[in-house]
Amino acid sequence: MATYAIGDVQGCFKQLQLLLDQIKFNPDKDKLWFAGDIVNRGPDSLETLRFIRDLGDNAITVLGNHDLHLLAIANGRGKQGKKDTFNDILQAPDREQLLDWLIQQPLLHYDEELNTCMVHAGIHPHWDIAQAVERAREVEAILQGKKAHEFFHHMYGDKPPKWSDKLKGWDRLRFITNVFTRMRYCDKKGRLSLKEKGAPGSQHKGIQPWFKIKDRKTRKTNIIFGHWSTLEDPQIEHLYPLDTGCLWGGKLTALKINKKLNKRYQLECPQAKAIDTRHGYKNKKGLRKVKKMVTYLFR
């Protein structure tokens, strides 16, 4: 039996299948961890969601910001944006079953035996792993309870920017959600800078990637995360970023989960550049390349 963690799929179902073929994934015995954002922006969100749901206990998925956005839209919070590509899920005959499964997924997965944690975006530098687990469970309890619909009407927003144990209500839940699903940068006092989205080195003065904040309390915990496609591997011990920009023509990455966490598998995804998430495909050349790869896989 083997276990692999996979970075942001974002509805790129065909690329996911090619990567699983590369690692010789056996759904009867192997397990997959998904670092969130399994849907949206790519062309095949419905197929991706169905596939991962149908893996049952052989898959562990944490919620990303795009997954929560889908759930919010399904709960009547706002309208789909021009770049959203999950209308196929909202119109599917099994819509309710799929969304019911998705909302039951955690914000954080922690394997104590392996000392390994998986989240979508990161862990606040002032939280230790026990605190992170506890705070993730606060939001999960709301999502899986009677106040889920109300939660989505309070989820969006960048405030409050700073954590306090005294935070209560929707402000507290929004901050926790932003940490686990949106955070990239913060300052030394732990104030989030959610508008900063570029690669390290492009940020404004006074803020740093969350994992570079001095005395970060999870320095000795293995952390697997996605969300940051412009982040190159910082080569920091116990840190495993997996979003390598498949959607944007980069790579889709799988990390073998074992005691050393040192074996990666990557699928080059130049064909993803051919995908225009609103109108199908940008060019015929890219479309032919996608069709050729998919035909090879499924023939």
Image: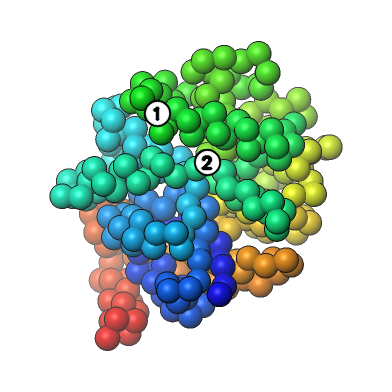
Question: Residue furthest toward the right?
Answer: 215
Quadrant in which the N terminus is drawn: bottom right
* Percent coordinates x, y for residue 253 in the rendering: 54, 66
* Percent coordinates x, y for residue 240 in the rendering: 66, 57
Residue beneath the point at 80% across and 49% down: 220
Crowd rating for badge 1 (residues with CA inside 10 Å; few <14, some 14–19, many 20+): few
Secondary structure found at label 2: loop
Residue beneath the point at 28% across and 76% down: 291
Crowd rating for badge 2 (residues with CA inside 10 Å; few <14, some 14–19, many 20+): many
Residue beneath the point at 75% across and 59% down: 235
Q: Nearer the viewer, mark 1 or mark 2?
A: 1
| Amino acid type, label 2 | Leu
Residue beneath the point at 70% across and 69% down: 262
Q: Which residue is mark 2?
A: 107
| Amino acid type, label 1 | Gly
**In terms of depth relative to the viewer, which is nearer, 281 or 191?**
191
Q: Is any atom of residue 9 visible in this view?
A: yes
Residue 114 falls left or right of residue 56: right
Secondary structure found at label 1: loop
The quadrant where residue 184 appears: top right
Q: Is any atom of residue 124 visible in this view?
A: no
* Percent coordinates x, y for residue 146 in the rendering: 36, 25
Q: Which residue is mark 1?
A: 145
54, above or below 180, in the image: below
